[in-house]
Amino acid sequence: MMSPVTSHQSQRKYYAVFGKPILHSRSPQLFNSVFEKSGMDAFYTRIRALSGMDVIEIIKNLNISGANITTPFKEEVIPYLDFISDDAKLIGGVNTIVNADGKLSGYNTDHFGVTRSLIESGLNLNGLKCLILGAGPAARAAVYGLVKNGAEVTVSNRTHSKAQLIADDFGCRVLEIDKIKSEIGGFDVVVSTLLPDANPISDVDLPSNLIILDANYRMSNFGIYAEAFDCKIISGKRWLINQAVESYKYYFGVEPDVKLMEKGLNVELEKNSINAIPYSSGARFVSLINVDIVISLPAAQVGCLNTFLDEEVCKVFGS
């Protein structure tokens, strides 16, 4: 049930990750581990929104101090922001929003997730030959960060026109999916921004010296496939942590304790004790403390909370 915010709770700062689906996100574990050990009066939760406009309304109505944005809202929120950083404009997607007294500023830290994950693995990005799979906001961020650091970037996507648009925007090369098989030996790194179930190159033999950075922090079908060829896999967990560090710096102006974030990443949700509450448009007095997920619903469907929660649970834990 929704409950009024107490005077103590009103002093607490709230942060959230928005997406649909969203229960799978481990961002709350990363941030809350730092908040708890540092004695900060703050709490981070997950919010399943209806649209980009809904994301903005919730941030304002619930006075969310900072938000991370994931699929499918990275592009949708842009028209409603008061300020957008130059890199977010070029990438065409926002994954971090800072709320300063109602003024919402959008940033993109995904490109740090990519570049720093590769650098900490001992790679020199200058001249590195990288193949990017996918053409969504995460792919655009990867291309932006890699090109900026001097990598030689090629983009491939089932919809060739989407890959071509990225190539035109960032001055990189496009490779058709069916040509990867003959050219895979020329790449040092493959960055996969594909959905977990996707693997458009399941007929390609991967060189064992190929390095794979997977955006998914649970092993994806592509990651499993690459592992069978003894490729080195850089987990999407590194991407998640490295982009979260930059988001934290936008929220607080200081570097977080990364080791605390890494410990928090290993905290698992308990399937049978998930604390979920509904949100309906216009609500302002909602207690978010210790809430695992807020589900935004049209007013007529607020009574259907468990139906949508079951959908989220199934995506994380299976049926």
Image (cartoon, grey):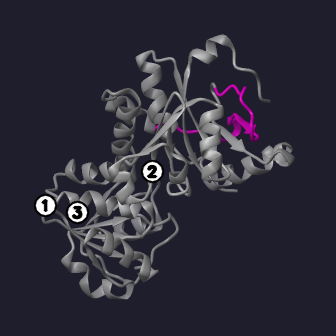
Q: Residue at x 25, y 48 (%)?
A: 116
Q: Residue at x 39, y 40 (%)?
A: 244
Say which label, 3 or 1, has the lower sequence index.
1
The span from disc 3 to disc 1 (Cα, nearest Å) is: 9 Å
- Write down the residue under mark 1: 126
Image coords of residue 240 (percent x, y): 40, 46
Which amino acid does the dot numbered 2 rest on? Val
Residue closer to the observer: 227 or 194: 194
Q: Is residue 287 above or below residue 319?
A: above
User: What residue occupies the far front of the structure in this picture?
Assistant: 82
Mark 3 secondary-structure assignment: helix
Quarter where residue 193 is shown: bottom left
* One can see residue 310 in this view: yes
Image coords of residue 205 (percent x, y): 31, 81
Q: Is residue 176 left or right of residue 194?
A: left
Q: Is residue 48 above or below residue 155?
A: above
Say which label, 2 or 3, has the lower sequence index.
2
Image coords of residue 93 (percent x, y): 44, 56
Res 312 label: none
Mark 1 secondary-structure assignment: loop
Quarter where residue 246 is shown: top left
User: What residue occupies the far top of the structure in this picture?
Assistant: 7
The span from disc 2 to disc 3 (Cα, nearest Å) is: 19 Å
- Write down the residue under mark 3: 147
- Of the 4 image quadrants, the one containing the N terminus is top right
- Of the 4 image quadrants, the one containing the C terminus is bottom right
Quarter where residue 302 is shown: top right
- The stretch of residues the image draws in magenta is 266-288
Which amino acid does the dot numbered 3 rest on? Val
- Write down the residue under mark 2: 94
Identify the main secondary structure in magenta: loop
Q: Residue at x 51, y 45 (%)?
A: 81
